[in-house]
Structures are given as structure tokens and as C-alpha cells.
Image (spheres, rainbow, N blue to C red):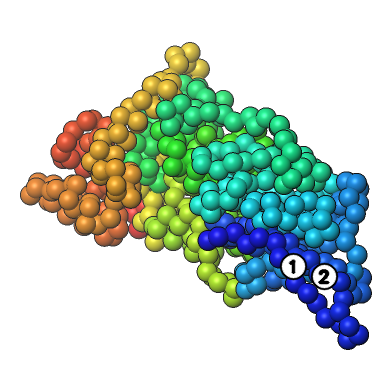
Amino acid sequence: MPLVAARLYPSRSRIGVEPMRQIASTWSAAVVGVSALPVEVEVDAGGGKENFVVVGLADTAVKESRQRVKAAIWNSGYSCPEGFITASLAPADLKKAGPCFDLPIALGLLACSGQISKDNLAEWMVVGELALDGAVRSVRGVLAISLLARDRRVRGLIVPVLNAAEASAVEGVKVVPVRDLREAAEVIDGKAVDIPIVVKKLANGQIPRAENPLGVDFSEVKGQEAVKRALEIAAAGNHNVLMIGPPGSGKSMLAKRLPGILPQMTLEESFETTRIHSVAGLLRAEDSLVRERPFRSPHHTISDIGLIGGSAHPSPGEVSLAHHGVLFLDELPEFKRSALEVLRQPLEDGQVTISRASGTMTFPARFMFIGAMNPSPRGNFEGRPNGQASRRYLNKISGPLLDRIDLHLEVPAMKHEELLSEEPGESSAVIQKRVERARELQRKRFGPNSSTHANAQMGPRELRKRVPMDREAKALLSSAMTDLALSARALDRILKVGRTIADLAESEKVLLDHLAEAIQYRTLDRQIWG
């Protein structure tokens, strides 16, 4: 789409003709969900009674820019045009939120009054919030805006200095960071502004990663070898896990070390995760991309909206902030029942759809779910629960939610001998190598053009193709479904976990031993809830 240059329009009054009214335009962007949409900022100034209006379905933060813009112009050494000023944000039917339009509106006013070039301004895309002294503050969603600027083929993108590293992660767009309004005006007039952009470079398209991102390691966990094995399987196939055990058995300790054995993020995963964190305002100024898999652990008092996302202007919730990472819910039965039930859609579809009167918005939410809970309100694990209190406590986790969790693990209390042992456990780096080998087998099996990247993401048709069953395997699964009263969804989970166990063993076929081990990870739900 060609860029619209500044224009001049005559205006008539009741008594004769007023002086020529001046209009200047530039480009900015509105962040909707995790994407950015183009917004043309038009500013009309001159003539009429002193006033300043902003039109174009703007929220309160945008309308308040009038005071910030005028103060920033005067305090930067420029003069603000007098008379009736109109700032229009087009398209008019797109909701505009946030203070990112301050800088383009201010530059439009300077162009209207002839203090900077109108023609040059129309070729740029500009975002930034203004302080009263003219300083340019950071805004959210700059990575998505930078991707839009690349696609629109504008002359360049002017961003706040604190957003420069994030914007520069996108190749093919000229990013110019500015510290204040005066520097932005000098850029428009072609004056050189040399501000270095510090970006962590990518090596061969790979995301650089620290050896120990969270400062924790599996070697610090004493005992619990069976649980470690199950978590390795979960990491290898991106499976969901529920851990049940008494307090002090190491559930939280194990969950916090899970990101350290997950595969390194790909460039595509890093871009998707960064866009979400940028929109949520969680990206640090020195980071161009999110390099580590997220680990989100919200408190059990979190609301449905906080977990799933939403509000009047929908924003990402915890499930989206955990995209391509881990969502850990400790003390699972203490969460509100409604909050747990809204997890069904993202666990099944890998995305969250939020509907409001203004429209429908979809956020990605493909994460690994880890839940931890005590077996009873008292915290003890004494086989099957006794009494109505224990039954009510355990029944807070619904059957449909359990069916969407691949591995159900019993985490027993630690023995004194294990706690006092000086023998170090297997390190996260060693386990991660086995996990990455299994993931590489899965990537080759699904192919480069497939939307499926891990065994847990397989659909029914692909599952039957990748996990063929002979007579013995069918007999074993039929017996398990009868004895454990498993659902059809639980059967699919068993087949997916069996395929992952075979991948860890580097076996092309899923053997009976692999399926038998997968079945044992489905026993807790029916023994306790059945």
C-alpha cells in the first residue's frame, strides 16, 4: 500500500476564507491480541477556536495524550500550533489503546507547523510514549509492530531506546531508536542519530542458551528415581503431568527443575513466546528475544481471567505466558473449580479463544502442564481415601480434566537413607541430551512442514498411523481399559506416552513393554477417583 504524503486543504469560514489548514500524516500501529495492525495518524492544525481532539475510537490513555504531547513539544524547544487541532487515528472502527500514539501525534503537529518535513514523516512508522519533558518511554508489543513494519516496507521504524533490542530481532526493517522528541524530529529531517543497539546475536539461527537457566539441577534431587524417569518421558513428548504425594516429597522441587531438561527453543518458538511477553509488558529492555522456556507458577488464588486471559481489553493470561514452556499449578485442589475447568480448551487445542462484544481474540497457549497436590486435606497418602472430607478434596479435580493429563504420578515420602545420601543424582544436562535425541526423532518422523512437533500433539488419525497395534497390544489395552475404566481420551494418552517411551529407547516400533509402562502412569486417576 503506498504511503500517503502530507496534504494541504483550504478551509472556508462564514466570513471569507481562512488561512490554509495543514495536514500531516505518518504511520503507527495498534496491538490486537499478539498481532499489530497498521494505523494512519493524521493531524490537522490551524484556525478556529483553541482546542485539541483525538478521534478514531481511542481509549482514555490515547485521549490523555493531548496534554502529554503539548507539554513535550514546548519542553523540547518547539512550538505547538495554535487553533483547533484534530488528531485522527484510522481506521476509525479499530479500537486504539495505550500511549504508543504520543510520539507520532507530536511529530504530526511539528510537521503541520513546518518545523519538520511533512513528506519525510509520511514514510516512517513511529511508536512511543512521551514524558512531559519530551523523553520517549517504552511501549508494549514492539516485536509485533516491527514485523508489521517489515511487511509494510516503510522507510524505517522509530522506537524508544528501551524497545530497540526487541525491534531489531526482526530482519529486513530499519530500526531507529530515539531517547526524546528532539531526536525523533532530527531523524525525520535526515539528521544522523547514532545510538547503538545492543542485540544478542543468533548463532546459525539458534537461540543462545545458558547452561542452567533457573539455577537449579536434577542432580540436587535425592531419590525419586521413578518420578524422574516419568518427568523425562514428559519432557521428551511434551506430555502433561499430575504429581500426587505428601508434603516434603519433592513435588515442587522436581517441577522447578523440569525446564532445565526441555529441548532448546527454536527461533520460531522464541519469536512466538517473545510476542506474547512483549504484549504483556514482561520483556526486559536488554533482551531482544525470550531465550529460555517460560516457567509460570501462579498462586491458587488466581482468577479465571488471570489464568486464561481476558478483561475488557483482552490480554494474555498465565496459560499464554507459559506458551512453549511450563505451567505449574501447586496445591491443585486449592484452585477454584471454575479456574481449573477453563484449562480444558488450551490443554486440548493449544490456544485460548476469548469472545467480547468488540470481537473474538485468540492467544496461543501450547504449554506443558504440571500439577501437584496432596492426596488428602491432611497431606497423608494412605492408599485409598477414607471419609467424605478426603473424597471432596480429591473430587475437586474433575474426570474430564484428568483425562487431559497424560501421566499421573505417585510421589512417595522420602526415606531417611535417601535424604542423607551423599551420592549426586543424574544432572539435568545428561537428561536433556536424551530428551533432545527423542525430540529429534519426532521432528524427523512428522516432517518439517507438519504442525505437529511432539508426540503429545498428535491427532487421532496421526496417532493410529504412528502407533500401529498388533493383537497382543490390543489385548493389553483392552484389559487395561476394562480394569481401570479408562475413557477413549485416556487410551489416546497411553498410546502417545508409549510412542515417547519408544523414542527414548530409540525403537522404531512401540513394543508391549513400552505400552505397559505407559499404562502404569494412568492408574492413579481411577484408583483414587474411580
97 shown above or below 9 = above
Question: Which image quadrant for residue 79?
Answer: bottom right
Find numbered disc 1 in the image and state the secondary structure of the residue it sits on: strand
Given the image, on which type of amino acid does mark 2 rest? Met
**Position of residue 156 measured from the top left corner of the image (x, y, whole percent):** 61, 46
**Position of residue 243 measured from the top left corner of the image (x, y, whole percent):** 44, 42
174 shown above or below 72 = above
Q: Which residue, as the protein is rendered here, is positioned at the far front?
A: 16
Q: Nearer the viewer, residue 48 or 38?
A: 48
Q: Nearer the viewer, residue 78 or 529?
A: 78
**Position of residue 100 measured from the top left corner of the image (x, y, whole percent):** 71, 54
Please tell me which residue is depicted at 72% across the width and 35% down the height of the picture.
192
Given the image, on which type of amino acid does mark 1 rest? Leu
Instruction: Find out whether the residues at labels 1 and 2 contact each other: C-beta distance under 8 Å.
Output: yes
Q: Earlier in the sequence, mark 1 or mark 2?
A: 1
The disc label shown at residue 20, or none: 2
**Position of residue 274 measured from the top left corner of the image (x, y, whole percent):** 55, 43
Q: Which residue, as the protein is rendered here, is positioned at the far top?
A: 422
Q: Is residue 504 left or right of residue 472?
A: right
Find numbered disc 2 in the image and state the secondary structure of the residue it sits on: loop
Please tell me which residue is depicted at 18% across the width and 33% down the height of the picture.
507
Q: Which residue is mark 1?
A: 8
Question: Which image quadrant for residue 304?
Answer: bottom right
For the residue carrying disc 1, how many other residues have a C-alpha within 10 Å: few (<14), some (14-19), or many (20+)?
few
C-alpha gap between disc 1 and disc 2: 7 Å
Please tell me which residue is depicted at 62% across the width and 36% down the height of the picture.
165
